[in-house]
Image: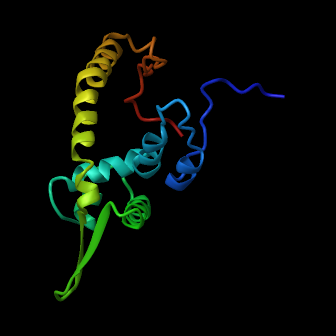
Amino acid sequence: MPIESAHARRPMVSPSEARDGCDSADGRSLCPVLAAVGVIGTEWRLAIVHRLLDGPQRFSEILKSNPRLNAKTLSATLKFLESQGVVQRTVVSTRPFSVVYSLTEMGLGLAPAARELRAWGERWLLPRQNATSRAAARRTPAIQGELPRIVPADADAPRAR
């Protein structure tokens, strides 16, 4: 039987589930934090909110903003954020029609938190990532698991049949 570690991933809770599990007897309830994490608690949700802080964007513009983001994930994330009241979807009546996504007042309220998370990442995570990549660049190929390529001396000579 496998033993679960203390760092095992817990399933995400919805904002309503977070409110239901509130225990405010000590006066320091985590309910608002848990509810907020339930809305913006994934990598793509916060990244899309951060992108929309620059102003309204079309689906294709958001999709092109990150090469790791695919259309299926973006579509599902935008639908979720729209259902939570964070993002507003507007159909522009042009030929051909286009859809523009923007932040609602609730979504704009996330601006300070999104900017603070960016600043925190730039201060604490980027230096660590840069140090790791510099250390990796100093390693020899054998340490990285890549063996030098051996080429036979007569590789350029035509083969006999």
Q: Residue at x 41, y 59 (%)?
A: 77
**Any part of residue 68 in sight:** no
> In the rendering, at what x and y percent does residue 15 appear?
49, 53
Q: Quadrant of the C terminus?
A: top right
Image color mode: rainbow
Residue 79 occupies which quadrant of the picture? bottom left
> In the rendering, at what x and y percent does residue 97 appear?
22, 84
Picture layout, residue 5 above or below residue 54: above
Q: Nearer the viewer, residue 37 or 131?
A: 37
Residue 92 occupies which quadrant of the picture? bottom left
Picture layout, residue 45 above or below residue 124: below
Q: Is residue 124 left or right of residue 71?
A: left
Q: Nearer the viewer, residue 16 or 118?
A: 16
> In the rendering, at what x and y percent does residue 52 appear?
22, 56
How many numbered marks are there?
0
Q: Residue at x 29, y 15 (%)?
A: 131
Q: Residue at x 31, y 16 (%)?
A: 137
Q: Residue at x 27, y 24 (%)?
A: 126
Picture layout, residue 74 above or below residue 25: below
> In the rendering, at what x and y percent does residue 10 appear?
60, 38
**Any part of residue 119 in sight:** yes
Q: Is residue 94 left or right of residue 10?
A: left
Residue 105 occupies which quadrant of the picture? bottom left
Q: Is residue 7 left or right of residue 101?
A: right
Q: Quadrant of the N terminus?
A: top right
Picture layout, residue 49 above or below residue 89: above
Q: Nearer the viewer, residue 106 or 78?
A: 106
